[in-house]
Amino acid sequence: MRREWRWLMLVAAALAVGACGARAYARLAAPYYALAARAIALAHPWQIERVRITSQSAPGAVLQLEGAVRRRADDAQPAARLVSQLQLAALVQSPVIFWSVLLAWSAPTRRRRVTLLLTGLPVFLGLEAATTVCQLLTPFAYASAVLAGESPTTLWLRWSNFLEEGGRVGLALAAALCAVALAAAIGSRAAHRAHRAQRQPAPTSGWPSTLAPRSAGRERWHPH
């Protein structure tokens, strides 16, 4: 099959999965979003309670993150309670683009294909944390800045605006190419190691030269 047709079929399949499976993917990824959000919140006076999907109609379905913001980390009571949300249509952009590129990328062997997919998994988790999780936490950073009397135009807000204006697509493409480069480096290193192993001489049978008996060269035949 020509590469152009393969790309076209993968793009069509990715769009179909993104349109029909957004809710299923969000439900599957929600525990990871909550875990990543709680890990990031450890460095801030934020409390992450839960991540859930609301609305039964697919076009209006959103992913919600609920939590609280304190003025200081040691405050007993939160200063504000927040609910941030993200449309599921925006949420599936990164996985659709990332995995479409990796699946369409040519690999000479099945082992290289498996290496590419396994290498892409941690890169994809980082991509999701940098996009979806950061966008869900942007209102928390905004509330913290307001409570501290600082400018609400934080780096979190600028990053969220960048993602909404097309940065999510570019970041997904960059992450996919990064995974391809890492997989190529791992494959080249493994091939170089295998080549060096083949060039090593095989062990010879019999006595090694350093362990040969010293009397072997001194034996002579004496007639009786």
Image (tube, rainbow, N blue to C red):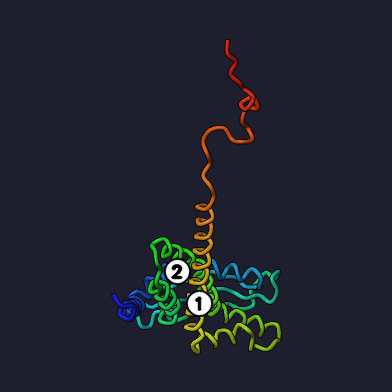
Quarter of the image where one finds residue 70: bottom right
Residue marked by disc 2? 29
Q: Can residue 192 be seen in this view?
A: yes
| Quadrant occupied by the N terminus | bottom left
* Residue under numbered circle 1: 132
Amino acid type, label 2: Ala
Q: Which residue lies furthest to the left in this view?
A: 1
Image spot of residue 143 (x, y percent): 62, 82
Left or right of 3 in this view: 176: right
Q: Which circle's residue, 2 or 1, is located before the other in the chain?
A: 2
The quadrant in which the C terminus is found is top right
Say what secondary structure mark 1 lies in: helix
Q: Can residue 50 be seen in this view?
A: no
- Rendered location of residue 205, percent (x, y): 51, 36
Q: Which of 175 and 59 is in front in this view?
A: 175
Q: Which amino acid does label 1 sit on?
A: Thr
Element marked by disc 2: helix
Tag 2 and tag 1, C-beta contact below 8 Å: yes
Mark 2: give few (<14), some (14-19) or many (20+) Cα within 10 Å. few
